[in-house]
Image (cartoon, rainbow, N blue to C red):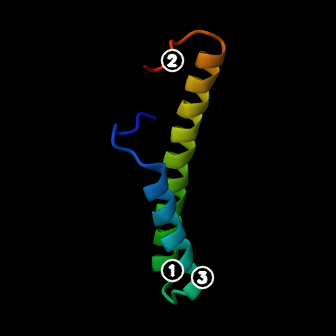
Amino acid sequence: MELPADFSLEEKLTELRRLVEKMQQGVSDFDRQVELFRQGMELIGQCRGYLDQAELRVQQLVNGELKPLE
């Protein structure tokens, strides 16, 4: 998954927290609950992709495959 260059993990986590708060407040419309859940899963996927890419870069740095940023 290719993420945009301006991806912000902090912003995505804030969005996810807002979604969770909405769900915890008890949306009575089932379809709305399902949509909030879908949005949350999408955000989790984006965050996971970002963290996977970061982990790969760190491993490459540790293994000497990448040069440290200057």
Residue 19 vertical placement versus 9 (above, below): below
Q: CA distance from mark 2 to mark 3?
A: 43 Å
Residue 1 in picture, x, y percent from top left: 46, 35
Residue positioned 61% across, 9% down in the render? 64
Say whether disc 2 or disc 3 marks the residue closer to the N-terminus. 3
Sort mark 3 into few (<14), some (14-19) or many (20+) by Cα contacts within 10 Å.
Answer: few
Residue positioned 57% across, 9% down in the render? 65
Secondary structure state at the residue bearing disc 2: loop
Location of mark 2 (residue): 68
Location of mark 3 (residue): 24
Location of mark 1 (residue): 22
Q: CA distance from mark 1 to mark 2?
A: 42 Å
Say whether disc 1 or disc 2 marks the residue closer to the N-terminus. 1
Sort mark 2 into few (<14), some (14-19) or many (20+) by Cα contacts within 10 Å.
Answer: few
Q: Are marks 1 and 3 in contact (CB under 8 Å)?
A: yes
Residue 35 in picture, x, y percent from top left: 46, 70
Sort mark 1 into few (<14), some (14-19) or many (20+) by Cα contacts within 10 Å.
Answer: few
Residue positioned 54% across, 57% down in the render? 41
Q: CA distance from mark 1 to mark 3?
A: 5 Å
Residue 9 in picture, x, y percent from top left: 48, 50
- Type of amino acid under label 1: Lys
Furthest-top residue in view?
65
Circle on res. 10? none
- Type of amino acid under label 2: Pro
